[in-house]
Image: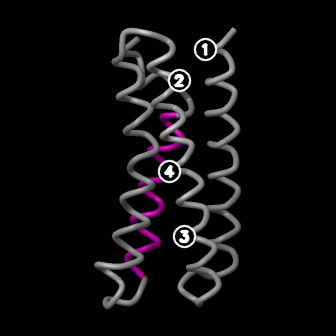
Amino acid sequence: MNYFKELKVWQKAIELVTETYLVTKEFPKDEIFGLVSQIRRCVISIPSNIAEGCGRKSKKEFSNFLGVSLGSSFEFETQIIISKNIGYLKEEQFLKLESEIHHIQNMIIKLQNSLEN
């Protein structure tokens, strides 16, 4: 099951990581060890757990890693809401990231469901 680079959800998550790094470069410098670090850690966790799950021996283990990835996606969503509310993200940046994370969340859920059938 180590075909993670072929998974569209992994590819989309990698794109989100790249975009997130670029957007958070603009956050205040005093947030580098706070919100920026937290946002970057959880967004990196999304494709990382998908990839790690692909390397596992069973569908059940893969599904568990997808669950972790999904949890990280909700953490990311929460943090971009906070970032928008305190003025670190512009509305258009927020809406783009929010749309992308919702798409990724749906893809993860569909992949998880396919493993259970």
Residue 18, by quadrant, is bottom left
> Type of residue at label 3?
Gln
**Distance of mark 3 from mark 4, alpha carbons?**
10 Å
The answer to whether 96 is drawn above or below residue 4 in the figure is: below
- What residue appears at the point 58 percent right and 70 percent down from the top-left corner? 80
Residue that carries the numbered disc 2 in the rendered image: 63
Which element type, helix, strand or loop, lies under badge 4? Answer: helix
The magenta segment is 10-26
**Distance of mark 1 from mark 4, alpha carbons?**
20 Å
**Distance of mark 1 from mark 2, alpha carbons?**
7 Å
The answer to whether 28 is drawn above or below residue 62 in the figure is: below
> Upstream in the sequence, badge 4 or badge 2?
2
Pointer 1 with pointer 2, Cβ within 8 A: yes
Q: Looking at the figure, which quarter contains the C terminus?
A: top right
> Upstream in the sequence, badge 3 or badge 2?
2
**In the figure, is residue 56 to the left or right of 6?**
left
